[in-house]
Amino acid sequence: MVVLGVWYLAANTAHNLEARKIASGFAFLEREAGFEIGESPFVAYGAASSPIWEKGRKYIFSIVAIAEDYQKGSLHLAKKIGVKKIAIIGEVVVGTPASEPPAIPWLNLLRLREVWGLVVAKFLTDGAWYFYLFWLPKYLYDARGFDVKQVGYYAWIPYAAAGVGSLTGGWFSSWLLTNGRSIDAARKIALGASAAVMPLIIFVTHVPVELAIVLFSIAFFGQQSWSTLVMIVPTDLFPRRSVGSVAGLVGFGGAMGGIVSNLMAGRMLDLGMGYGTVFAIMGMCHVTAFVLILVAIPRIKPIGRPS
């Protein structure tokens, strides 16, 4: 129901903006007031007439149908071979709780350099990511003279590249594994490649705006490739029962990095240091984080297991 409600709202909003000849994205802000706040966004335009709504409804119904088929298939399998046999198969594939290493206590996790290496690396790289994420439109306004419409036209491109990077990083690491590389080599080669493209952002203030968008896109691509891989590494290092705890710590480090970097960037710009200085600092965060991971995690292997 939540998904349906959100989709309904989005479909109506997009349809209403289009009908009123207001561009979606940022461009609707160009109208001084747009439609009044008190005016219902659903007036005179029904979602049923929106092509977005029609497509969304088909997708949602398809998902529901697949879920129903999956449930029916599970019940049929249970009746055919028995619940006990299904449990045995699950134990063979996943492993019984008794065969799993116990969870590492929190205090012991905080004593491991591997944990701190990942947390600090995430702190550095997510700090840069949140700066790019939130400051890109403002940079285009302040330094490149974009108006709201131009930001809407061009600023989406780096974010699309980020989505591609999220998929590419994991795929590249898996490809290396299937071609005979060890987990340690596959992860670190992919992480290193992701980090290697990040310093290109340093040149963004020195090139034409078209090339600046390209450099932003490369940086967004590399960051999300990196981020995907960093969140995979805990599964390679720690027992399954501890992965969630480590992932939470790593995510916490990234969130704190985002807070600090945005405060720092704002302060530096207020002091007149300029975007060039800020981009130079942010551009080296991923390389620094990669070196830190190499030092903190000399070999990616399960904790407590010999090489």
Image (spheres, rainbow, N blue to C red):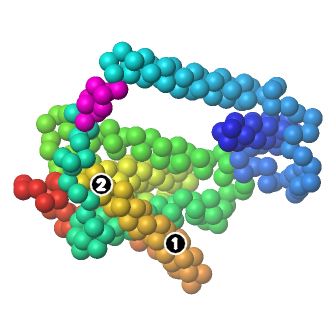
Residue to which mark 1 is pinned: 259
Residue 59 in sight: no
The residue drawn where x is 81% and y is 54% is 30
Residue 270 image label = none
Position of the C terminus, as image quadrant, is: bottom left
Q: What is the secondary structure assignment of the residue under circle 2?
A: helix
The extreme left residue here reads: 306
Observer-nearest residue: 115 or 166?
A: 115
Q: Which residue is mark 2?
A: 241
Give the residues in magenta: 83-91
Q: Is residue 62 left or right of residue 290?
A: right
Along the line of sight, which residue is nearer the eye, 171 or 213? 171
Q: Which circle's residue, 1 or 2, is located before the other in the chain?
A: 2
Would you call the spot at circle 1 few (<14 residues within 10 Å), some (14-19), or many (20 or more)? some
Please tell me whether mark 1 sits on a helix, a strand or a loop: helix
Residue 199 percent across, percent down from the top left: 37, 61
Left or right of residue 176, residue 159 in this image: right
305 horizontally vs 291: left or right:
left
| Residue 77, x across and y down, in percent | 38, 19
Q: Indicate whether residue 88 is drawn in magenta.
A: yes
